[in-house]
Amino acid sequence: MSAVTIRAEAKKLLALSLESGAVSAERVGAVLAALSKSRPAHTLRPLLRAYLANVRRELARSEARIEHAGPLSASESDAIAAHFTKALGRKVSPVLRRNDALLGGFRVRVGDDVTDLTASLRLANLAKSLS
């Protein structure tokens, strides 16, 4: 099987794994069960790797990973997630991670998109503008 064929098939498997636009654990289990019955195990490795990468990417698209320096309340994180849910047109849930290196503010990553509202970025931009 070529790499292009594997990627295309993994994409189809991901589509089968979605329920209402989100990855469903039950559907992923059904896809894996069907694959294990239909193909020899030694041929599955490249397809399963591509499928796993697609599932991880899809899961990352539904999480707002919020890095914050100071305390962040549940209502604030929910408001940030609601903002991204509205902006992106799909359900996004908050996942918090404390990062004291940010000095202040927060950084949000949804899939491949990063919104950086940290004090360290603002200070770096100020230093660039003064030099």
Image: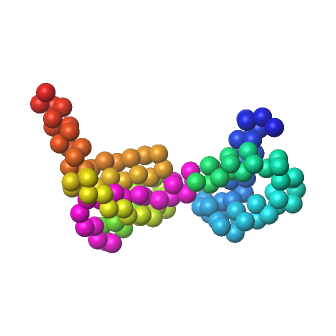
Q: Quadrant of residue 82?
A: bottom left
Q: Which residue sits furthest front?
A: 42
Does residue 79 appear anywhere in the picture? no
Part of the protein shown in magenta: 57-75
Left or right, 109 with respect to 73, comes to right
The foreground one among 40 and 31 is 40
Left or right, 85 with respect to 103, comes to right
The foreground one among 43 and 92 is 43
Is residue 63 found inside the magenta-colored segment of the image? yes
The foreground one among 118 and 62 is 118
**Percent from the top left, x then y, of residue 76?**
30, 67
Residue at image x 48%, y 50%? 111
Q: Which residue sits furthest bottom?
A: 74
In the image, residue 83 sits, relative to residue 47, either above or below, namely below
Does residue 4 appear anywhere in the picture? yes
Residue at image x 65%, y 67%? 25
Left or right, 82 with respect to 105, comes to right
**Percent from the top left, x then y, of residue 35?**
81, 57
Q: Which residue sits furthest top?
A: 131
Left or right, 21 with respect to 42, comes to left
In the image, residue 65 sits, relative to residue 121, either above or below, namely below
Question: In the rendered view of the protein, which quadrant contains the C terminus?
Answer: top left
Residue at image x 32%, y 62%? 98
Residue at image x 47%, y 45%? 112
**Percent from the top left, x then y, of residue 40?**
87, 52
